Amino acid sequence: VQLVESGGDWVQPGRSLRLSCAASGLSFGNYGMHWVRLAPGKGLEWVSGINRKGNSMGYAGSVKGRFTISRDNAKNSLYLQMNSLRIEDTALYYCAKEDPDMNGYLDLWGQGTLVTVSS
Amino acid sequence: EIVMTQSPATLSVSPGERVTLSCRASQSVTNNLAWYQRGPGQAPKLLIYSASTRATGIPARFSASGSGTEFTLTIYSLQSEDSAVYYCQQYDTWPLYTFGQGTKLEIK
């Protein structure tokens, strides 16, 4: 059972990037999924979440209107489309699985993918 | 947005001692509160959910309590591997969850 993030890169401010999270060993479509980030020298920040069916999403105020979360249950994959990137979006981005009862706590995390926004 | 405030920011304690970490919510989250441990270079790990229930495989020396706006995590018989940053997270308000800023625990 694991989550593996990919897509992190160095990008200039204002550009776009798409992160992916591949799930294996679990029934991906049965769980809500989330993105959480850890910026240098800061604490964890919840970024975005999506329900099992992909028809309800939520975003932190800092990314609302710029980031879009989506999922493809047939491909066991979670995505985060990041547009209009800012320097303050520099962080390690984790993919995390929600608990089976959809309470909202995160019981499985990936190792993260690094996004660096710099000119 | 519910703001989660953790205290203290840092702690330094000796092995074998007990430590208590605090987490306060800006409004009631009932018992929809989780604690996570992030060791150096590691992904966060779920310790506690529903304010006081230990996650699978978490030893009994990790104990948590609270409800509403005030929560605590107590770690007994501290061991070197407990050196980490500990975070609380409220999940009362879908679709907007929030974390505390973390408490860094150092084992001397």
Image: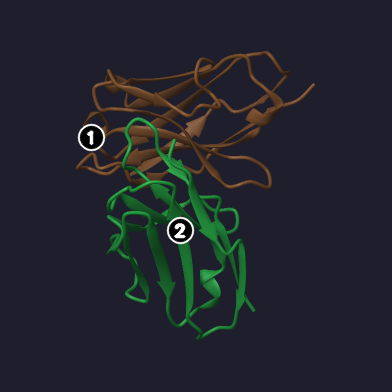
Name the element at disc 1.
Answer: loop
The chain displayed green equals B
Given residues B99 and B77, the one toward you in this image is: B99
Instruction: Quadrant for residue A58, please give it.
Output: top left
- Disc 1 residue type (three-letter): Ser
Q: Report in which chain the residue with disc 1 lies.
A: A
Q: Report the residue that reaches farthest toward the bottom.
A: B16
Q: Report the residue that reaches farthest toward the right.
A: A119
Residue under pointer 2: B23
Bin the neighbour count of mark 2 within 10 Å (Cα to Cα): few under 14, some 14-19, many 20 and up. many
Whole-percent x and y of residue A99?
Answer: 27, 44
Taking the spot 25% from the left edge, 27% from the top edge, the residue there is A52
- Disc 2 residue type (three-letter): Cys
Please state, as top left, top right, bottom left or bottom right, where the N terminus of chain B lies in the image: top left
Taking the spot 32% from the left edge, 27% from the top edge, the residue there is A76
The CA span between labels 2 and 1 is 33 Å
Residue under pointer 1: A27
Instruction: Quadrant for residue B12, please give it.
Output: bottom right
The chain displayed brown equals A
Image height of B10 relative to A53, above or below: below
